Amino acid sequence: MYPRIIIKELRPLNLEGGYLIDGFPSVGFCSAIAAESMIHTSQFKLAGIIDSDVFPPISLIKDGKPNYPTRIFVNDELKVAAFVSHLTLEASLHRGIAKKMLRWAKNQKISLIVSSISVKSTEKNEEILAVGSTDSATKKIKESGIKILENGTIPGIPGMLLNEGSLTEQDVIVILIHSDGVSPDFRSSANLCMAISQLIPGTSCNIPALQEEAKKVEQVIKKDVEEAWHLKDSMYR
């Protein structure tokens, strides 16, 4: 049995035919930073929260107000939703999160889920690759001009989204971004944001603003993740 994961929508949504961006940091912080930066530079508004009894009980205080660490933001005009999390979840939760995300996307009649993962590289490699869960998803990658990943391994939430999406015929695209794991993630996050904008019509990235914002976001996310892990360790000793 998977742990119970709750999605609570805070307002009515109309995302039929729209898009969902996976901003869970399953491997590295690049996905979370890109998603968080995009909602800061575009017209995204808070639309829901994601919670579970197995998540660390923590509140993120922003501008004097409490926030759940895992939230849903939506650009109503573009019909784009983003799952943004400041929690690094254990691998045992990845399958459950992916299944919940897919069920929510189906209920919302989402046409495409876009996820991503960082690939560690010691060389300065900014090549962007992607893989799709279905033939139609693969076609969208080709039409965007992004190179197809022919062989490889995709772990974590992105991997489960691909596998489950292929069975349910849900279009899922996972973008692969290279990172050396040492330099600031905002460089890879900016590349990822640009790749997302190639796949989701209407989205765009103000790169100078994004890079400046991503530096701040990276520090906040890493601090929140560290505090959440410290809290969890103290809970289960």
Image: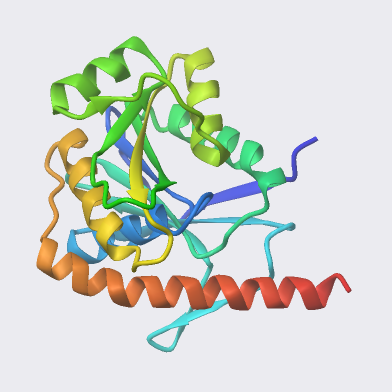
Left or right, 86 with respect to 72, comes to right
Tell me which residue sits at (36%, 25%) in the image: 131
The way the protein has been coloured in the rendering is rainbow
Of residue 185 and residue 44, the one placed in the foreground of this image is 185
Tell me which residue sits at (29%, 55%) in the image: 188
Tell me which residue sits at (24%, 66%) in the image: 40
Query: Please, which residue is most extreme toward the front here?
Result: 123
Of residue 115 and residue 51, the one placed in the foreground of this image is 115
Which quadrant holds the N terminus? Answer: top right
Left or right, 33 with respect to 28, comes to left
What x and y, as percent, mark residue 141? 23, 24
Tell me which residue sits at (31%, 19%) in the image: 137
Q: Quadrant of residue 58?
A: bottom right
Q: How many marks?
A: 0
Which quadrant holds the C terminus? Answer: bottom right
What x and y, as percent, mark residue 54? 73, 57
Q: Quadrant of residue 236?
A: bottom right
What x and y, as percent, mark residue 18? 27, 33
Of residue 207 and residue 20, the one placed in the foreground of this image is 207
**Vertical placement of 149 versus 92: above or below?**
above
Left or right, 139 with respect to 184, comes to left
What x and y, as percent, mark residue 221? 45, 71
Query: Please, which residue is most extreme toward the top here?
Result: 135
Query: Please, which residue is most extreme toward the right here?
Result: 237
